[in-house]
Image (cartoon, rainbow, N blue to C red):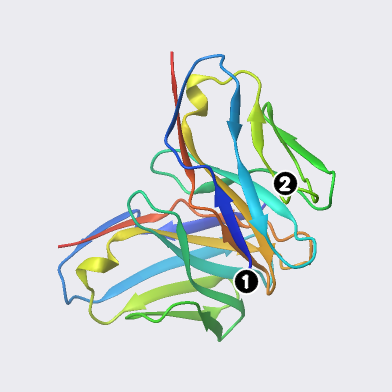
């Protein structure tokens, strides 16, 4: 079945450091891919998405490129801020209008 | 614009007591609706999803149930809570179009079963 594997956390960085959170997936066909962010005590918010191979999703300085050849959708940001501290979830579209989520990666950015 | 509401925001219940969590969506029609549970330090577990009134699919066997009495209302229930039911419960909706299935989440309900 469909699955998503995220790099294990927690990840701790200093402000202005470069961020990469790895995400790989297993799926039939070419599902849409998503990154969600969850701030403490809140629900999930869509951060960015890509609907086909080689698409690049971007938002708030974050980027991720849909790589079909490596079945990956790694999240990157060139310079993180303290306010980026949150849990990040990679997800893919599954049949029946459902999403399959990764386990989440906790990011802490220190000033 | 669309909004999603969940209540209550927090709940503390004794083991064996009943549960009713409510989720409502505004600003859209015939959404797909979802209930997730997020245990502490864990990922999201899909509990139920619904593509229409009275249509409920259960993803995991458990002592929880869901109902959709109205198009934009989704209710999560239990007759007798277990300690293991503690967690953060999230409701979500989507428009259900292929390739556009991003889901939009409510603020969540923090449930503690003692």
Instruction: Identify the mark nearer the N-term, 2 or 1.
Output: 1
Label ID, residue A1? 1
**Same chain assignment for discs 2 and 1:** yes
In front here: B76 or A15? Answer: A15
Residue displayed at 54% across by 68% down:
B34
Residue pictured at 33% horizontal, 72% vertical: B20
Please identify the quarter of the rendering in which residue B89 is found.
bottom left
Question: Which quadrant does the C terminus of chain B fall into?
Answer: bottom left
Give the image location of residue A62, x and y in percent: 67, 31
Provide the secondary structure element on which disc 2 rests.
strand
**Whether residue B110 is situated above or below residue B61 in the rendered picture:** above
Question: Residue B24: x, y in percent?
Answer: 52, 65
Q: Secondary structure at mark 1?
A: loop
Q: CA distance from mark 2 to mark 1?
A: 21 Å
- To which quarter of the image does residue B2 belong? bottom right
Bin the neighbour count of mark 2 within 10 Å (Cα to Cα): few under 14, some 14-19, many 20 and up: many
* Location of residue B55 by image quarter: bottom right
* Disc assigned to residue A49: 2
């Amino acid at each position: 079945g469909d699955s998503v594997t995220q790099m294990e956390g927690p990840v701790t960085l200093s402000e202005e450091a470069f961020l990469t959170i790895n995400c790989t997936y297993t799926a039939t066909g070419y599902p849409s891919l998503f990154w969600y962010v969850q701030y403490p005590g809140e629900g999930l918010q869509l951060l960015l998405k890509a609907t086909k191979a080689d698409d690049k999703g971007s938002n708030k300085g974050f980027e991720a490129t849909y790589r079909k050849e490596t079945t990956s959708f790694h999240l990157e940001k060139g310079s993180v801020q303290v306010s980026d501290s949150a849990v990040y979830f990679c997800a893919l579209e599954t049949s029946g209008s459902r999403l399959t989520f990764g386990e989440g990666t906790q990011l802490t950015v220190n000033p | 614009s669309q909004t999603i509401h969940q209540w209550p925001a927090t709940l503390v219940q004794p083991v064996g007591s009943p549960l009713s969590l409510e989720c409502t969506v505004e600003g859209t029609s015939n959404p797909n609706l979802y209930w997730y549970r997020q245990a502490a330090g864990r990922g999201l577990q899909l509990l139920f999803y619904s593509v229409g009134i009275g249509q409920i699919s259960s993803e995991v066997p458990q002592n929880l149930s869901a109902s959709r009495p109205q198009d934009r209302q989704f209710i999560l229930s239990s007759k007798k809570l277990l300690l293991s039911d503690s967690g953060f419960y999230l409701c979500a909706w989507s428009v259900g179009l292929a390739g556009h299935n991003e889901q939009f989440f409510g603020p969540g309900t923090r449930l503690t079963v003692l």
